[in-house]
Image (spheres, helix red, strand yellow):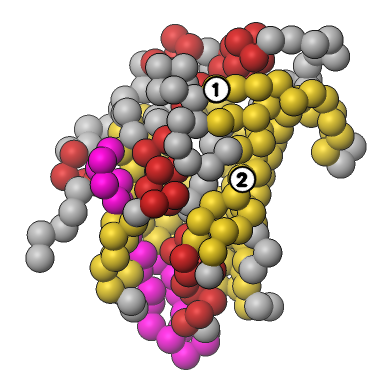
């Protein structure tokens, strides 16, 4: 069980947000931004706090828990997870991951404190709030249109997002609504022994303060899956930078 739970620490590594004719990357990005609520609504957002429930599924075991995710522009982030291991004879497991816009670390109630470096840190720094699409060119990233594909029965437009450093992502947008329905990227996860491919499927989009938020997120890789069901979203709630910083010893 302890080995399985290490996967939960890496479960939130990655997380983002039609016409048949060929289109430019700029046109595709603007359509995606419009589907999120538009540049005007998005640029009004300074913070976001999300609360919800989660289930980690691995090795035939489902572990329930709660999660709170906080974001502050430009790229401060925190996820606070509590996993209930009582059904398996364990104590509550708390995982607190923080990024202050320059560095990142994780506090795990079972394994202690560790610095987050390398590819995982690069990806956290790239995840600018509320979306990297607003200023990706200034950040040195590029977007390419990979074409139209089928995702199940759904027609999707695929964009390839390549940051200046960090993992490349393939982003699948519904060809009709331009809502993000899948993102796929390879990330470095030391807990898994190396690089893994992680898929995130957002769904159940709802309007909150003029922007569209997916209220269900399913993150999966070859070893485990994490399902998050959002219960509450708050925007522009005052958040001190210390919320995302290192805890004093």
Mark 1 → mark 2, Cα distance in angstroms: 15 Å
Q: Is residue 197 visible?
A: yes
Find disc 1 in the rendering and name its residue. 142
Is 208 located above or below residue 34 in the figure? Answer: below
| Residue plotted at (29% across, 65% down) | 114
| Badge 1: residue crowd in 10 Å (few <14, some 14–19, many ≥20) | some
Q: Is residue 219 left or right of residue 40?
A: right
Q: Is residue 203 visible?
A: no
Residue 246 picture location, percent across and down: 18, 54
Find disc 2 in the rendering and name its residue. 185
Say if mark 1 contacts mark 2, CB within 8 Å: no
Secondary structure beneath label 2? strand
Secondary structure beneath label 1? strand
Mark 1 vs 2, N-terminal side: 1
Q: How many marks?
A: 2
Q: Residue 64: within the magenta?
A: no
| Badge 2: residue crowd in 10 Å (few <14, some 14–19, many ≥20) | some
Residue 5 picture location, percent across and down: 49, 74
- Which-is-in-front pick, marks 1 and 2? 1
Image quarter of the C terminus: bottom left
């Amino acid at each position: 069980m302890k080995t399985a739970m290490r996967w939960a620490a890496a479960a939130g590594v990655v997380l983002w947000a039609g016409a048949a004719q060929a289109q430019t990357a700029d046109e595709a990005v603007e359509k995606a931004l419009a589907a999120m609520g538009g540049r005007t609504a998005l640029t009004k957002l300074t913070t976001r706090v999300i609360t919800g429930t989660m289930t980690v599924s691995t090795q035939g075991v489902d572990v329930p828990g709660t999660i709170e995710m906080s974001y502050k522009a430009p790229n401060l982030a925190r996820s606070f997870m509590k996993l209930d291991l009582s059904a398996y004879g364990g104590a509550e497991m708390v995982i607190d991951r923080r990024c202050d816009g320059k560095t990142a670390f994780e506090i795990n109630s079972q394994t202690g404190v560790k610095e987050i470096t390398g590819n995982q840190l690069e990806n956290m720094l790239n995840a600018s709030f509320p979306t990297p699409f607003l200023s990706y060119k200034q950040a040195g990233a590029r977007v390419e249109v990979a074409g139209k594909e089928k995702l199940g029965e759904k027609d999707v437009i695929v964009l390839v997002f390549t940051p200046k450093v960090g993992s490349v992502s393939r982003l699948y947008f519904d060809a009709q609504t331009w809502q993000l329905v899948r993102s796929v990227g390879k990330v470095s996860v030391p807990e898994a022994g190396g690089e893994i491919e992680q898929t995130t499927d957002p769904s159940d989009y709802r309007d909150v303060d003029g922007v569209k938020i997916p209220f269900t997120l399913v993150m999966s890789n070859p070893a485990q899956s994490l399902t998050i069901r959002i219960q509450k979203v708050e925007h522009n709630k005052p958040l001190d930078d210390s919320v995302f910083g290192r805890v004093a010893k």
